[in-house]
Image (tube, rainbow, N blue to C red):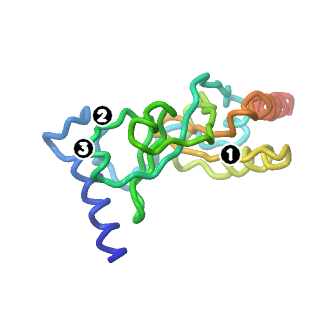
Amino acid sequence: MLAERIVRAWEAWRHESEPGSTLPQEHRADATVGAPAPGETDLTTLLRDMRPELDERRYAFVSVSPATVEARKPVYLGRFHEAEGVTLILEPGEAERLGAPTKVHWARITLAVHSSLSAVGFMARLGAALAAAGISANPVAGYYHDHLFVPWQERQRALAVLQGLAAAASAD
């Protein structure tokens, strides 16, 4: 049963990348499978040039059924299919509209450096610095940039930690 749910989630995602999909061509599955991901891979350069940018909007993480996503067509920043449901990253008002209100809000910090999906150690270094400050972080990798979701009330402190890490890398 679990395997069937994973297969259905995979097929739903794959459908979005097929010809005729509403996704723009540049966002469809890459035909160069096995090719190195573009972007920076050098850890020192990534740390030095990360340029963390704070998005002032609040976000929520919710899990809803695939049927809810299909029927209600939510506006979301991110989506990930899991066996238990569809995780959405969206604004709290949209979560309420879906019937999935949440009191836990997150801030998004985008790392403006064009990082490669193949980069090694970048998230580990950022996670270690934030953990040392007692700040939880949920990373999301985009094709061009990495994003960190930190507790809303810790956003300024998290930004300062990341800026300090970048400054230290620049000084080396």
Mark 3 residue element: helix
Q: Nearer the viewer, mark 3 or mark 2?
A: 3
Say whether disc 1 or disc 3 marks the residue closer to the N-terminus: 3
Residues at marks 2 and 1, CA–CA distance in whole angstroms: 29 Å
Which quarter of the picture shows residue 133?
top right
- Residue situated in front as seen by the camera: 115 or 95: 95
For badge 2, the amino acid type reads Glu
- Residue situated in front as seen by the camera: 170 or 146: 146
Instruction: Determine which of the numbered discs, if any, sits on residue 164 in the image.
Output: none
- Picture residue at 49% right of the left edge, 35% below the top: 144
For badge 1, the amino acid type reads Ala
For badge 3, the amino acid type reads Ala
Residue 166 on image: x %, y %? 77, 31
- Picture residue at 31% right of the left edge, 59% below the top: 9
Residues at marks 3 and 2, CA–CA distance in whole angstroms: 27 Å
Instruction: Determine which of the numbered discs, if any, sits on residue 26 in the image.
Output: 2
Q: Which residue is mark 1?
A: 137
Residue 32 on image: x %, y %? 32, 49
